[in-house]
Image (spheres, coloured by chain):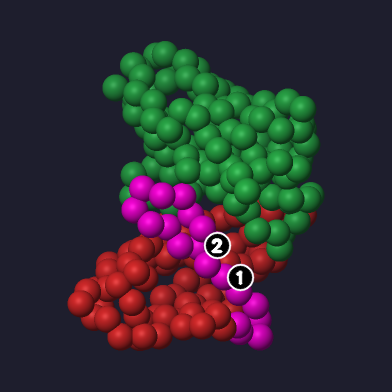
Chain colours: A red, B green
Amino acid sequence: RKEVEQDPGPFNVPEGATVAFNCTYSNSASQSFFWYRQDCRKEPKLLMSVYSSGNEDGRFTAQLNRASQYISLLIRDSKLSDSATYLCVVSSSGGYNKLIFGAGTRLAVHP
Amino acid sequence: GAGVSQSPSNKVTEKGKDVELRCDPISGHTALYWYRQSLGQGLEFLIYFQGNSAPDKSGLPSDRFSAERTGGSVSTLTIQRTQQEDSAVYLCASSPKRGLAEETQYFGPGTRLLVL
């Protein structure tokens, strides 16, 4: 079983749609949680950190449920520019920031 | 300001040859990481440096892989006797302090390695 699992997609949605991505992780001792965005043939870039209390950044909302070991990302009012692969990322419990990446969920927003 | 840079951006090599990949982290960043992304796969951790030492080499896939970091800055990842399964994008990331769990890692653009 992979340490971080995501639905690979692709999610094909029209502009303006709301789309939700889910992710589960297997290591209950994981300390920090992130969503990264990766455009085609580009490096990953941090989208947002994820906190137990939930956090929002504009159209993006992230949630963490430690009991269920579940992370989510909600994108409201999708834009064409949101088309990318979204990577669920968990940091290890080894006292430093070893990131464990999910394989990513592809999002394609169409006009 | 300058981000993480990597060279070469692309490398094509023949099976059995050695390759060296270079990473220049953001100036002042003490933590440096190497990852690998194979086609259609998620990123896979290879090695972590804190300063010049590598406390975690657990992700290196075989003894053909090695890495070093000098002067607390530039790092090189060396793959000896390359195999076709080594073909991937090799990404380097750095973070400011001691690689704490909550720190943001900044990624370089990667080196695309193709082993024929």
Q: Secondary structure at mark 1?
A: strand
The image quadrant that residue B10 belongs to is top left
Task: Find residue A46 and name its label.
Answer: 2
Total residue callouts: 2
Foreground: B36 or A55? A55
**Looking at the picture, which amino acid does disc 1 mark?**
Ser
> Residue at the spot x=50%, y=30% of the render?
B7
Are callouts 1 and 2 both on one chain? yes
Marks 1,2: beta carbons within 8 A: yes
> A46 above or below B62?
below
> A19 above or below A37?
below
Residue B6 image offset from top left, x and y in percent:
53, 35
The image quadrant that residue B102 belongs to is bottom right
Q: Residue furthest left?
A: A111
Subunit of label 1? A
Foreground: A94 or B9? B9
Residue A70 image offset from top left, x and y in percent:
53, 76
**Looking at the picture, which amino acid does disc 2 mark?**
Leu
Task: Find residue A49 and name its label.
Answer: 1
In magenta stretch: residue A52: yes
| Start-end of magenta stretch | A36-55
